[in-house]
Amino acid sequence: MADIVVSVSAATDTGGRPDNEDAVLEVSLASAGDGEIGSQPGFLLAVADGMGGHQRGEVASQLAIETLGRMVNEDPGADTALLLKQAFRRANDVIHQNGRASGDGSIIGTTLVAVVIRGKYATIANIGDSRAYLVRANQLTQITRDHSLVAEQVAEGAMTSDEARQSPHRNILTHALGHRQKLDPKLPSIFEIVLLAEDRLILCSDGFHDVVGDSDMVEVVLQFDPPGAVGALIDLAKTRGTTDNVTAAVVRVESAKTVAGRERELDTVLAGRPSQWIILVVTGIILFVAIVIVALMVF
């Protein structure tokens, strides 16, 4: 029996815009059948934030997640980091070719952040400024590094993190899928972590992380299950006045003992309740007796 149990959820919303150029992916992965990692079913989650004129950003983000999902599912036994790199590069080629084929000279592109989870191992890949966060021991850590102008300036010491968050140039990207014919050999950035019980992962687009603070993220994902957390996070971003599309995915990691205990408690509660058919039978008998009594009183 596995030591941990993973549950996931993801959603996207138009947020502060009339159209949605974000895309989200949530799929269960087949077991590879051999090996400690590959023999366990897993999950693939991804968030893409498209950009391009005439709603072409929607095309770019959708192509990214479709290509990613297809390639990762084709070879569940492959090395995960290598598989993600290949999928990102293939997505870049597909998006770039689509932009050129449009004939209007437009350049389309998209960010992409993805996580593959197999057992207790999570492999994360990203390009652009869609992010992955880890919540562990009530602390939030940004796992990914933005490929953006302000992120480079922060790394060089030319700007503080607080200044970057307020900069009017914070959404200018240095790398994205589809912008160039070939992806930089160093990309995507890859991060590997071992998941622990009570961890949470958050994947999100900039329409979310630009307006929602760290403490709010932690509070929400620890309070709700993944579907509830995703809904609450998106609602929070909209309440905070996001002007962009909003996309979020949440991963909850629990110990197998905790999940088993919760299921036993639920079984106990349900066992203590009369079953539905018994309630219906008793109700019917009461109604029948009442009708008989009324009839006897009348006659």
Image (spheres, helix red, strand yellow):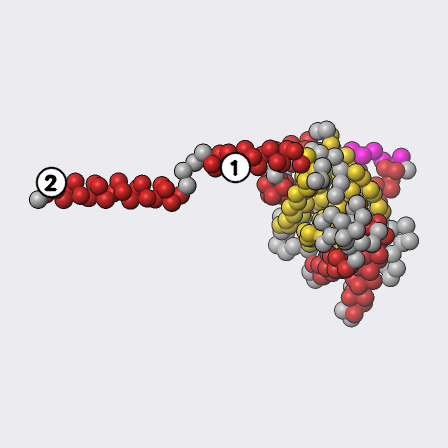
Whether residue 52 appears in this view of the structure is no
From the viewer's perspective, is residue 59 above or below residue 80? below
Name the residue type under label 2: Met
Q: Is residue 15 magenta?
A: no
- Count residues near mark 2 (Cα–Cα under 10 Å), then give few for <14, some for 14-19, many for 20+: few
- Count residues near mark 1 (Cα–Cα under 10 Å), then give few for <14, some for 14-19, many for 20+: few
Whether residue 286 appears in this view of the structure is yes
Mark 1 highlights which residue? 267
Location of residue 263 by image quarter: top right
How many numbered marks are there?
Answer: 2
Q: For mark 2, give the secondary structure.
A: helix
Position of residue 240 measured from the top left corner of the image (x, y, whole percent)? 63, 39
Q: For mark 1, give the secondary structure.
A: helix
Quarter of the image where the N terminus is located: top right
In primary-sequence order, the first of circles 1 and 2 is 1
Position of residue 103 measured from the top left corner of the image (x, y, whole percent)? 78, 70
Which tag is nearer the camera, tag 1 or tag 2?
1
Name the residue type under label 1: Asp
Mark 2 highlights which residue? 297
Front-lying residue, 180 or 89: 89
Q: Is residue 230 left or right of residue 97?
A: left
Residue occupying image coordinates x 43% and y 36%? 273
Position of residue 100 measured from the top left corner of the image (x, y, whole percent)? 81, 67
Residue occupying image coordinates x 66% and y 44%? 8
Q: Which residues are magenta?
A: 157-163
Position of residue 84 measured from the top left corner of the image (x, y, whole percent)? 81, 52
Cα gap from disc 1 to disc 2, whole angstroms = 46 Å
Residue occupying image coordinates x 14% and y 44%? 295
Location of residue 284 by image quarter: top left
From the viewer's perspective, is residue 50 above or below residue 1? below
